[in-house]
Image (tube, rainbow, N blue to C red):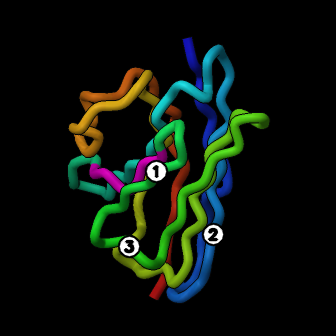
Amino acid sequence: QVQLVESGGGLVQAGGSLRLSCAASGRSFSSYTLAWFRQAPGKEREFVTIIRWGGAKYYADSVKGRFTISRDNAKMTVYLQMNSLKPEDTAVYYCAAMFGYSSSYYYTGSYDYWGQGTQVTVSS
């Protein structure tokens, strides 16, 4: 079992930055692929970024060049640094974990565990 707890969300002006954290508890953290998804009001949950146990990273086109994912296996924490934020980035951001890796990493059903989410609001 893995439990995920996100933090760091809030209200920021367009062009600003936020850093989200996701603290995990459980075993074999380093064996998990970790991801961030987001869900805006009235929309489906969408893929943002993942980081594999070896450090490989993939990003959605909408955040590429602005967001950076990282992980600290010793602290069992994954981070999402968000820069140059836009109003369209407003959403609840969720941390997710899957054991191993799947090429369908953009699909919510590929993940075994989810956090409760943290709200990010970007004002124009």
Nearest to N terminus: mark 1 or mark 2? 2
Mark 1 crowd level (few <14, some 14–19, many ≥20, 10 Å Cα): few
Determine the residue positioned at 24% across, 38% down.
103
Determine the residue positioned at 52% across, 35% down.
116
Nearest to N terminus: mark 3 or mark 2? 2
Question: Which of 47/121 is in front?
Answer: 47
Nearest to N terminus: mark 3 or mark 1? 1
The kind of residue on which mark 3 rests is Lys
The kind of residue on which mark 1 rests is Ala
Q: Secondary structure at mark 3?
A: loop
Q: CA distance from mark 3 to mark 2?
A: 15 Å
The C terminus lies in quadrant: bottom left
Q: CA distance from mark 3 to mark 1?
A: 14 Å
Give the number of the disc on residue 18. Answer: 2
The N terminus lies in quadrant: top right
Question: Which of 100/96 is in front?
Answer: 100
Task: Work out whether residue 97 can be spotted.
Answer: yes
Q: Which residues are magenta?
A: 46-51
Give the number of the disc on residue 56. Answer: 1
Question: Which of 71/21 is in front?
Answer: 71
Secondary structure mostly seen in the magenta stretch: strand
Q: Is residue 68 above or below residue 21?
A: below
Mark 3 crowd level (few <14, some 14–19, many ≥20, 10 Å Cα): few
Q: Which residue is mark 3?
A: 64
Q: Is residue 14 left or right of residue 20?
A: left
- Residue 20 in percent (x, y) is at 62, 56
Q: Secondary structure at mark 1?
A: loop
Residue farthest toward the right in the current orientation of the protein: 75
- Residue 121 in percent (x, y) is at 50, 68
Q: Is residue 2 left or right of residue 57?
A: right
Q: Is residue 25 left or right of residue 119?
A: right
Q: Is residue 27 above or below residue 41?
A: above
